[in-house]
Image (tube, helix red, strand yellow):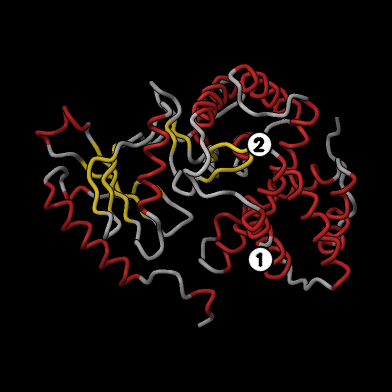
Amino acid sequence: MSSLYQNSPTSSEQDARLALLTEWLSSLGLVEAGSRRPASSDASFRRYFRFDVAQALRAKLGDTLIAMDAPPERENVPAFIHVQGLLHEAGVSVPAIVARDVERGFLLLSDLGTTTYLSRLDSDNAAFMYSDAVDALIKFQLHSQPGVLPEFDRAFVLREMNLFPEWYINRHLGVTLDAAQQAKLDKVFEAITTNVLAQHQVFMHRDFHSRNLMFLDQGNPGVLDFQDAVYGPVTYDLGSLLRDAYIQWDEEIVLDWVIRYWQSAKQVGLPVNPDIDAFYRDFEFMALQRHLKILGIFCRLNYRDGKAIYMGDLPTVMDYVRKTANRYTELKPLIRLLDAFEDKAPQVGYTF
């Protein structure tokens, strides 16, 4: 078996962990161990299960709780706990930690429900839902301080973008870059990296999008999947939110939402570029870096981990990539490379 596949847990490993989880929950006496059902799917090795709370404790804990199974050799439970604390301190709605067994990788969490942003968003409610999400993002960013989270540095930026040639170009398209093509791609990567590293840094969720935001009646939104947070460019999470791989909006609408964020961020003293045109350029370059990473990750999830569902979102992400790259002289070589790889005519996107 290829080394690419050796990191995935086997069914027997998962069953063994499930037995340990059930044993731990039974010892706590907080939930009805026999009520287990899947709570959500995840692109990582984490698993989530929903349990009914013991009848006598429902007034205190609610009707259901979520058990997280995060194998400690593959997932960073201390990081989850650390970032949960930062978000909570910032006033952002996150699952409360009811019980923990960090050594074995188990957490029992409060339940934020089943309604994701993705399942609820439509053209009628998008404005107020994104306004709530931006408010939560700004709260987290205002709480920022250096030295608390890992830095999104040059090595980090390039490591993420290099998933694109490794998994999208090489593995998915079956193309091996020649020296000239590699040089062109490296030059595009350098232009992106120079821009994003010049941006001011704040706390960065790193996956702030519609599948990780839960619609809540109070304290909307609930924020999930935050354990990989870092200290990085101020536009990153805004790009994750408004250039979402799972839902796409007209560019003029997104531009309006970006401007509204920029105005609010300036008012509260966040370190955004004071010029809106320059800020929008920062937003676009940052979103492009993320989308190149996502193209690689979605292909890796398919070919390495057998999670084919993400391949259906490749066209949306590629649409973002092409439209953005086509707007900037230093990024246009990426369009020509893609055309050569995919044998497509150049595509022209919305321009400003």
- Between disc 1 and disc 2, whose residue precedes? 1
Residue holding disc 1: 167
Label 1 and label 2: CA atoms lie apart by 30 Å
Residue 286 position in % (x across, y down): 70, 43
Observer-nearest of 128 and 204: 204
- At x 82%, y 64%, the residue is 341
Residue 59 position in % (x across, y down): 16, 27
The residue furthest left is: 56
Circle 2 crowding by C-alpha within 10 Å: few under 14, some 14–19, many from 20: some
* Tag 1–tag 2 contact (CB < 8 Å): no
Observer-nearest of 180 and 232: 232
Amino acid type, label 1 = Trp
- At x 75%, y 44%, the residue is 195
* Left or right of residue 223: residue 173: right
Residue 310 position in % (x across, y down): 57, 54
The residue furthest front is: 147
Q: Which mark is residue 55?
A: none
Quadrant where the image shows the C terminus:
top right
Residue holding disc 2: 200
Circle 1 crowding by C-alpha within 10 Å: few under 14, some 14–19, many from 20: many
Residue 193 position in % (x across, y down): 73, 50
Amino acid type, label 2 = His
Q: Quadrant of residue 76?
A: bottom left
The residue furthest top is: 267
- Callout 1: helix, strand or loop? helix
- At x 80%, y 28%, the residue is 277
- Callout 2: helix, strand or loop? loop
* Left or right of residue 54: residue 287: right
Observer-nearest of 265 and 147: 147
- At x 73%, y 30%, the residue is 250
Does residue 53 lie above or below 336 as drawn?
above
Q: Nearer the viewer, mark 1 or mark 2?
A: 2
